[in-house]
Amino acid sequence: MPAPLRLGVNIDHVATLRNARGGFYPDPVRAAHDAIMAGADGITAHLREDRRHIRDEDIERLKRQILTPLNFEMAATDEMVAIACRVRPHAACLVPEKREERTTEGGLDLAANPERLGSVIARLKEAGIRVSLFVEPEPAVMDAAHRLGAPVVELHTGSYAEAFLADDQARTDAELDRIRRAAAHGAAIGLEIHAGHGLTEQNVGPVAAIPQIVELNIGHALIGAAIFVGLGDAIRAMLSAMEAGRAAAPQAR
């Protein structure tokens, strides 16, 4: 049987809505509690350099108040490393960050400055934080992540999601195959495999069926659906779609 599949709920865009008018409502920490009550296995929050959604105090409150693991998405900067080492979330996911981007546009370039990235990974691990790298789904990238000492990778599923949305079956199949190959290779060399970006109730099934993937991190689709059906129902529907996909998973080798 494949490993159980966890759901991490990203609450960034609850904070985006709050920040649109300032103040304290809606509260992303309340959203985290509601997500956990609905079945989320963990909470993800990205503290960006420009603080466009999650704020420093949100991270502090999440660490103090939630009982499930907190996954702190962060750029590999001195500022963010210092915050992570002070707050000590369960996990830190290192992501690329561009000042003008609307959302994360791709995986980390692990070859750009491996010494710097390796140093950041080591500092976080020394603080007792599980480190993951948000990366493109390629076997060579899995090898690079392993060499850097990261125990976990999160495969970027954005290209798959874009192909699915465009109803381009050939491209969707090709992107899904990329994810499958990377997940199989990464797991074979000892990495824990997560995935996320652009996943929805409609497209999550084939990704959930990949047996080596043990965690999905999903945010925008859930917060968007919550406008219409409420956060709890949105999460329960996503979990059902994940479970249906997982039921189709082949035996991991």
Image (cartoon, helix red, strand yellow):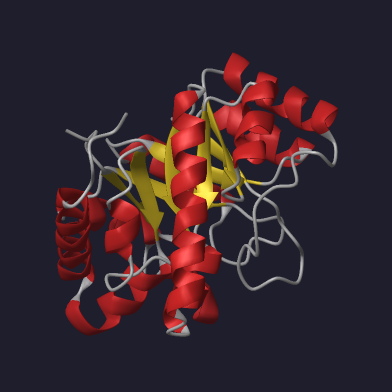
Q: Is residue 17 above or below residue 145?
A: below
In the displayed orientation, state which residue is furthest to the top: 126
- Residue located at (64% from left, 48% from top): 95
Coordinates of residue 81 in the picture (x, y in percent)? 68, 33
Question: Of residues 89 and 8, which is closer to you in this image?
Answer: 8
Q: Is 225 on the left or on the right of 199, as rendered?
A: left
Residue 12 visible in the picture: no
Q: Is 177 on the left or on the right of 100, as rendered?
A: left
In the displayed orientation, state which residue is furthest to the front: 170
- Residue located at (22% from left, 49% from top): 36
Residue 136 visible in the picture: yes
Coordinates of residue 117 in the picture (x, y in percent)? 76, 32
Number of numbered callouts drawn: 0
Q: Is residue 197 above or below residue 230?
A: above
- Residue located at (46% from left, 26% from top): 188
Question: Of residues 138 and 135, which is closer to you in this image?
Answer: 138
Q: Is residue 19 above or below residue 165?
A: above
Coordinates of residue 126 in the picture (x, y in percent)? 61, 14
Q: Where does the C terminus fall, quadrant-wise?
A: top left
Question: Of residues 157 and 49, which is closer to you in this image?
Answer: 157
Q: Is 86 on the left or on the right of 77, as rendered?
A: left
Q: Where does the N terminus fall, quadrant-wise?
A: top left
